[in-house]
Every structure is written in C-alpha cells, then in structure tokens.
Image (cartoon, rainbow, N blue to C red):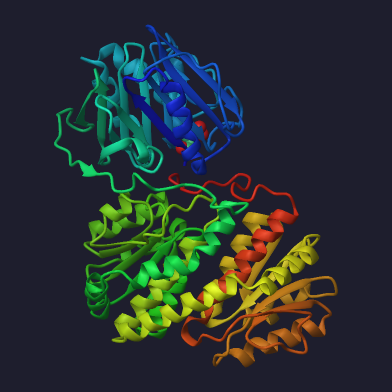
C-alpha cells in the first residue's frame, strides 16, 4: 500500500501540488505522510504521523518535490518512521511503497559496514543500500539500479536528489508518469487519478524500470541492463473525473447509491470480448476466480455463477492462499481476477505463476492502467468511476453483476442475462430511493450498535453475500461478525446461540429456502434473535428487511441492505466511515 507522488515542474508551489496529490492517494494508507522539497541546493522535509490535514501552509517555494502517504508495515506509526527518509549526508530522500522482504539481512550487512539507522522501517535499508552502491557505481542511476538487484519483495520508490533529479523505480507496486498539460511539468504517482486533472498523457512504468526526471525531461531505464528503454504514452482519458460526495455525507453512501449505474456500465459494454471469454471458458478444464478481501467474496460469487449457469468446474481462491494451486494451473485453465485497483499484490503473484504456465487470464478492474489489466488476455474494465471509500461497495456489485452476465453468456443466454441485469438496476434504484427502507435500516443499526458479535447466515446464491456483509460490518463498525453457511450452523456455531445474540439471515425464493429456514428455527429455538432479509416475512423473524424476489439476480440486490446496515452502524458508532482504522484500499504488499 502507501501512496507515492512526485512533481517536477515550473510552478513554485511543488510542495502544495504534492500535498494535494497525496490527499487523493490517502485511500492507500493514512498512518502518516511526508513531503520533501528542493529548497535551493538542499532538501527540506515536512512530515507528520496521522492523517493528511485538509490544508497546509508555510511550505517553502519549490518547483520539485516528492511525497508519501504511509500504511505502516515495518516500524510503528511515528513521525520518525514517516517517509521520505534522508540519506546520511542529506544528498537525497526516498519514499517507498512495498516491503523489503530481506531487510533484516541487508540491514545487518550495512550495519557491519558502519551505516547507522535512525528508523525502524525497511525503507531505510534501501536508502543506505543506495548510499553504499553509490560509492562504487559509475553514476547515481546505477547505484539505484544495482540496489534493486539486492532487494527481494515488491518495491517501488520515488527519490529526490539535492541537485534536483527525481527518480522513480518500479518493481511490483504501481508507478505512473504523467506528462503535464503545461509544458515542462511531470508527475509521478501510484495512480493516475491523483494527477488526472493536470496531465495530458501518461506512461505506466513496467516492473524493473526506472524513470529519471531531470531538467524537465525524462528517460526510462531498465533496472536489469541499465539501458534506455522505449515506452508507450497513453492519452489521459480521465482528466475530468470528479471526486466529490455529490451532497452525500460520505463517499460510502454515495457509492452505494451508484449501484444501479455500475450495473448499467456492465450490461452496456460491447458483448464481443465477453462472448470470446465465454467460449474460452466453455473449453477450459478449470476456472479459478481469484480475489482478496471484498474481491475474494466477489470471486467466489463469480465462481458460483459459473458453476450454476455455466456448468463449469469453477472454484475461487483467496489471493493470499492461492499458492497451493500454482502447480495445478495449466494452459487449459482460465483465471478470473476481479480487482478494484488492479494492483493487489497477492493476486498479481498468482497471475505471474499463471502466465508462466500459459493459463489464460481474464480480469475486471476499475482503475485504469493497472498491472492486472496489463497482464490479462481478456482485460475488462468496471468503468464504475472512482471508488473513494476504502470499504468497497459499488465495485463488489459491479464484479458480481459482471460474473452473472459472464455465466449467462457461457450458458448461451447472454440476452436473458442482460435483461435480468436491466430489471435489477431498476429495482435497485427503487430500493435505494425508498424512505421506508432507509428508516428501517437506520433503526436496525441503532438496535445492533451495542452488539459484541453479529452472525450472518446464507446459502447457495446468498452465501458470498453474507460473507461480504460480514466484511462490511467488520470494516465499518469494528463489531465482530461471523458469516457461515446456514447449513453449517448446527455443526459448531450453534453453541453460541442464546438470548441477546443477533443473527442476520438472507433468504431468497429459491430451492434452498427451506434449508435456510431450518437454520432460522434452530437459532430461534435457542433464544437468539433473527433479522431476516428476504422477500417474505416469517413468524420467527424479530426484524424483517423486505427485498424483492428477482430470481437469478436476487443475491445482487441483497447486498444493498447489508452495505447500508454497515454504513449506518459506522455512522451511529461515530467511526471514520470512508477511512476505517488500519486498512487501506489498494493492497500492494503481500
Ligand atoms: N514498508 C514501508 C513502511 O512500512 C512501506 C509500506 C507500504 O508500502 O505499505 O513504511
């Protein structure tokens, strides 16, 4: 995680430009932040623990600066550990996104050589390593390059030297160069969105590439060979992207309300690539859907749809737990990777293994220019607009709606799938605009806000929905939640059912309805209260949230009450809705 940003230009307010860039990157981490600016022939650094403030004053005038917003992996959340970090002689500063996996052995070696360390971060190892390499290197770029040869893990850095050179190096975490609308301005960042309004063109750095910016010009160099490399510039197509709450109190609520729109964005896409992928899947031996966190639940729902409607042998894997499948990937398999950022480190690792086995890769990504998109044979885009809240809502909807349409296409029923999504978008819109729905969910949030634990039960099409509901409740309310298959309740969690316990049960009018109602009875018999989310009320429900029966797409609708519940619980508990504690949106470390 972590966001890195750099500005090289003609304006005198480079520090402020970097500050505003960091504010747009803070979904990547908000433990601390820091900005380093060229001030004459020295470098000054401003850094703080905690979130980036709304405004900043008293930065020195400067036309070259770099910055960092941190999600701590190594070393406490302190001002001292905040990036950027200085070289011993203050000749350069460096900020990192990633983890130096071999930092301990490198640190010991460097300490033996006499280098002193003043922070607890793995980042400082990169700084000292570059200093050490620089003693023998032909030039500074070679020092950076050869330092990268010694690092293991996924690491991307941005660096500023006191003679005014900005260097970015990518190996894993994202790094994009922006070519400014105003002549002579260059930007470096972890994502395009953070500099989108100011740039005309972008260059997405590949892994193992360095960009060197000096005298308002840049060149791209290979980390491996040191030779200059060709690059591809792309026109910036998102320069008008607005990032505001549109009158909503929080981005989370705004984004939940965008669910009908994101579904339209899916069914309005050209069907050609979807049909090609469906054909490929039909002839595949296995389909693996891979994701992490919310995208993990989406991947599992996509695999479910492919089993049910596509009759495919499809399974889902959690990114961080996919490695035991790597040796099973073959060229006859298809991997599906849904991802908001397209930069999730553990998914990228799985895709790298898949590529080496020539397994075909399909992805659905929301952020443009990502590594997952670039690695895909079938690169789909959510086109859902930026998702700013760290908790994902609309992108989950987009991913499972896409998975449903894909499965219907594999089944040979693309048009029916599209029609079903069209009705779903209409029903979702009505649901979100019903005052009654919101009043009910707010009052439920009020009832649940003192809970210590919340259980969620579902089956078949609703199992991943309750799992994702659990993710939202844990992220937003910090209340412990536990989602499980309704049929598994009797095998273990039933020991915890007693008066005072709340159990949310999601039921659709499908063939497993009676099985889920058995679990409702079992819960009720032990005195726990049941919150039913279903088309029809039931005498055993203590609280009922009504949702329409939409047949095959029912599950996609039922995520809305769970997302809204997590939202109103977070609000009722006074939590930071858009930036829950400790997590970050784009997880580019393993
Ligand atoms: N490892 C670095 C730190 O803890 C950077 C972390 C990151 O990229 O998330 O400061």
* Total tally of numbered discs in the picture: 0
> Is 212 or 347 nearer to us in this picture?
212
Whether residue 431 appears in this view of the structure is: yes
Looking at the image, residue 440 sits to the left or right of residue 582; the answer is right
Q: Quadrant of residue 518?
A: bottom right
Q: Is residue 129 above or below residue 232?
A: above
Residue 47, placed above or below residue 292: above
- The answer to whether residue 106 shows anywhere in this view is no
Q: Quadrant of residue 287?
A: bottom left
Left or right placement of residue 126 versus residue 142 in this view? right
User: Quick one: 180 or 290, which is closer to the camera?
Assistant: 180
Which quadrant of the figure has residue 112?
A: top left
Which residue is depicted at the point 75% across and 85% down? 522
Q: Position of residue 113 (x, y in %)?
A: 41, 14
Residue at image location 26% in from the left, 54% down from the top: 375
- Furthest toward the front, the residue is 247
Residue drawn at 65 percent across, 55 percent down:
476
Left or right, 577 with reference to 347: right
Residue 528: x and y in percent read 80, 77
Image location (x, y in percent) of residue 411: 32, 86
């Amino acid at each position: 995680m972590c966001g890195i940003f750099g500005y090289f230009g003609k304006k005198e307010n480079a520090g402020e430009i970097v500050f505003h860039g960091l504010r747009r990157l803070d979904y990547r981490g908000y433990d601390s932040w820091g900005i380093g600016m060229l001030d004459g022939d020295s470098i000054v650094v401003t850094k703080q623990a905690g979130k980036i403030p709304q405004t900043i004053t008293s930065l020195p005038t400067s036309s070259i600066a770099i910055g960092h917003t941190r999600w701590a992996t190594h070393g406490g959340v302190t001002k001292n550990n905040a990036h950027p970090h200085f070289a011993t002689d203050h000749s350069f500063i460096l900020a990192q996104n990633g983890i130096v996996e071999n930092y301990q052995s490198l640190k010991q070696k460097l300490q033996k050589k006499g280098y002193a360390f003043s922070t607890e971060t793995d980042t400082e190892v990169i700084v000292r390593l570059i200093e050490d390499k620089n003693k023998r290197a032909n030039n500074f770029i070679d020092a950076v390059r050869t330092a990268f040869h010694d690092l293991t893990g996924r690491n991307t850095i941005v660096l500023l030297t006191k003679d005014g050179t900005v260097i970015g190096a990518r190996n894993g975490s994202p790094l994009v160069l922006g070519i400014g609308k105003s002549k002579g301005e260059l930007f470096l960042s972890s994502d395009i969105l953070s500099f989108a309004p100011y740039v005309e063109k972008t260059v997405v750095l590949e892994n193992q590439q360095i960009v060197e910016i000096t005298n308002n010009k840049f060149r791209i160099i290979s980390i491996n060979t040191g030779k200059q490399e060709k690059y591809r510039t792309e026109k910036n197509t998102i320069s008008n992207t607005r990032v505001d709450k549109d009158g909503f109190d929080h981005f989370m609520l705004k984004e939940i309300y965008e669910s009908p729109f994101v579904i339209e964005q899916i069914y309005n896409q050209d069907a050609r690539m979807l049909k090609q992928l469906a054909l490929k899947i039909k002839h595949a031996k296995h389909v693996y859907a891979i994701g992490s966190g919310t995208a993990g639940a989406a991947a599992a729902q996509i695999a479910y749809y492919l089993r049910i409607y596509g009759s495919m042998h499809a399974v889902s894997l959690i990114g961080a737990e996919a490695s035991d499948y790597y040796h099973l990937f073959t060229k006859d398999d298809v991997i599906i990777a849904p991802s908001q950022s397209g930069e999730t480190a553990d998914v990228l690792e799985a895709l790298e293994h898949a590529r080496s086995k020539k397994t075909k890769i399909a992805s659905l990504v929301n952020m443009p220019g990502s590594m997952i998109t670039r690695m895909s044979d079938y690169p789909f885009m959510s086109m859902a607009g930026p998702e700013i809240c760290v908790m994902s809502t609309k992108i989950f909807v987009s991913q499972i709606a896409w998975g449903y349409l894909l499965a219907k296409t594999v089944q040979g029923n693309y048009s029916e799938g599209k029609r079903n999504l069209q009705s779903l978008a209409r029903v979702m819109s009505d649901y979100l605009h019903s005052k009654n729905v919101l009043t009910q969910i707010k009052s439920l949030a009020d009832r649940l806000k003192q809970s210590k634990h919340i259980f969620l039960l579902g089956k078949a099409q609703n199992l991943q929905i309750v799992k994702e509901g659990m993710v939202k409740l844990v992220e937003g309310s910090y209340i412990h939640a536990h989602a499980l298959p309704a049929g598994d309740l009797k095998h273990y969690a039933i020991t915890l059912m007693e008066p005072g316990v709340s159990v949310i049960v999601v039921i659709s009018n499908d063939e497993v309805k009676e099985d889920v109602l058995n679990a409702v009875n079992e819960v009720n018999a032990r005195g726990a209260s049941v919150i039913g989310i279903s088309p029809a009320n039931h005498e055993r429900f203590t609280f009922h949230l009504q949702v329409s029966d939409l047949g095959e797409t029912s599950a996609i609708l039922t995520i809305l009450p769970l997302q809204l519940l997590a939202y109103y619980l977070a609000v009722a508990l006074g939590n930071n809705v858009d930036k829950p504690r400790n997590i970050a949106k784009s997880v580019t470390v393993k």
